[in-house]
Amino acid sequence: MVEKLAEFVANGELDAEFIHVESEHSALSAVVGASAAGARVFTATSSQGLLLMYEIMHIASSIRLPVVMSIATRAISAPINIWCDHSDFMAASDSGWIMLMGMNAQEAHDLVIAAYRIAEDPRVLLPVAVGYDGFWISHTVEPVYVLEKEEALRYAPKRVTWRALDPEKPVTMGPLASPEWYFEFRVQLQKAIEGSRGAISEALREFGQHFGREYREVDGFYTDDADVVLVAMGSVTGTAIPFAEEARKAGLRVGVVNVRLFRPFPEEEVFKHLENAKVVAVVDRAINPGSPFVGPLYSDVAVTAFKRGLDIPVLNYVTGLGGRAVLRSHLEAMVKHAYGFVGKRMRDVETHYGFVGVRE
Amino acid sequence: MSSFTIASIPREELLAPGHRMCQGCGAAIVMRHLLKALGKDVIIAHATGCVEVTTSLYPETAWRVPWIHVAFENAAAVASGIEAAVKAMKRKGLLSKEKRVKAVAIGGDGGTYDIGLQALSGMLERGHDVLYVLYDNEAYMNTGIQRSGGTPLYAWTTTTPVGKLWRGEWRRKKDIIGIVRAHGVSYAAAVNFAYITDFYAKVKKAAEIEGPAFIHAYSPCVPGWRHEPHLTVKIAKLAVQTGTWVNYEIERGTFRVTTPVPKRLPVEEYLRLQGRFAHLTKEEVDTVQRMVDEDVEYINRLAGTVVIGPVERKS
């Protein structure tokens, strides 16, 4: 990603300062500094790089800077592995950033443009991360409509909507807050991310009006009459949708939910697609070792169902870690397993999670 | 070294009173005069440390210039971003091209010698128009006097305590300007506020230079060095007079000592005012003296002449 941006800058197509930082920690620190000074900024990372940025991610959101970053989602060490899963993305999900996940290369591009509209919206002023599956999306070839600069700027015009560092009007950013004040800062961050939903919906809807590609926080496919609803994020949904069509021909009523907005988690929109299901099967590409919810997406989906009194089995299938391919046969195994729980309630389920596509 | 006199020091205070730095704090003196020398057209990126926490306790601030603190190890990276933003916005006509806004990074010895060294190296290497100011109080004073790469030989700290086996710090202070110099920067200088006109002249020169510049500021610490608050400036002066600290600059490769000391005082006079060296035996004082002698010899070699003279003992 940054290599392409370097070409744009090298050819004069993008008028920008390109900072060749010595680490991801400095990458995020430099964009935080530049954003604080009033500039529109971008950076990108993955895996260990994201973990190195982790400290500064929290600071960027709490100083309320509209930083935009792409994350080619990848596994984390050890063992070292450069392939896809969602461990890095999920590790950053408590850092106060708005988080979107693209399901193909076009979305990886489009959501970055939408991210500026969201981040810089004066009602929001939060950093936005756009995830897209490492290798499956980042290193495969797909045709993409690239927006013209003018079009993109019409949709997301540059406006400094935040207080910037300016010698004419000096401000202090990133102060020390004692127990008398720190708590209020954190509550303000929680309120800001909770309150960002309207601006996110608006930005996604208007993206469709401008460019004809409308994105929603959550997509549902065949969920109205599905027995088993698969909930997933990222490129796996691209496998799941044709799989569901095929399964239906074989008499398995399968629905698919694609979670595009992960933070703030769109509970209502997700729930809408679960309420008619008999079993929910959540596909995770990461684990929270030792957590009662093994998969991080599962934890959010299960709580969403629980809060609304949906007493059906919500199951978790962890798959595709460290770049292992998630095939239709894997999805089929999940659905067939899930079918065994039709008619049951959550308390009837003994084991809520399982690994799919792993050696016994 | 220049026409700068005490009378030229601006009256306007850009570091507001009411901050929570200790009585007799060296860093407070450094910051006050640093800001006076820099003037208003700066944006400061500050590393976590004593000065940061004592000047920015919400909802108050001592900074009358734009100021940001992000984390401990990244002041140079944050300042790189600020400088790049100012550059881009000037080019695009979003900021006035006439006015120079200088990006300044400030860090203590922990944030510079140790945890921030990588970010500092990156900033210097990339050639950002950033002035980096290191205020060196020779340990992590903010977190409780733990040793850093800037702690001198034999200094007591809470992590180099004096015990049955340990005699305080057992390693020598890292040559930070040597490291900076290796990046080929246009300007690097060591300053000591007991020589205030030299301090001003160097900060001004460093700020005016286009590209990365480095100021290493001597900064005594009352609780960390265990000295009386009224002795701060005296100790600062003794540091120079004993040759423990040398005021010098490296301007486009040319080395110059700006405060020559024809006759040095024995290092003991510097050490005995500080509780952190109270445990030193005669032999250990002699070891420190030999180390300072070696350092002085090195400085004289760089200067190409004897600018720091021999120790003159009072009879």
Image (tube, coloured by chain):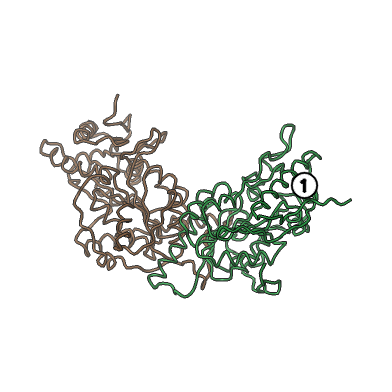
Residue in view at x 47 percent, y 58 percent = B127
Q: Is residue A175 visible?
A: no
Q: Is residue B4 above or below residue B104?
A: below
**Quadrant into which the C terminus of chain A falls:** top left
Q: Is residue B284 visible?
A: yes
**Residue B30 image point, x, y percent:** 66, 61
How many numbered discs, if any? 1
Q: Nearer the viewer, residue A249 or A71?
A: A71
- Res. B147 image quadrant: top right
Which chain is disc 1 placed on? Answer: B
Look at the image and give the colour of chain A: brown
Q: Is residue B307 left or right of residue A21?
A: right
**Residue B279 image point, x, y percent:** 78, 41
Q: Is residue B39 left or right of residue B160?
A: left
Look at the image and give the colour of chain B: green
Residue in view at x 40 percent, y 72 percent = B94
Q: Is residue A307 above or below residue A315?
A: below
Q: Nearer the viewer, residue B123 or B109?
A: B123
Would you name the residue on which mark 1 appears? B275
The kind of secondary structure element at disc 1 is helix
Residue closest to the far right: B315
**Residue B110 image point, x, y percent:** 60, 49
- Res. A337 image quadrant: top left
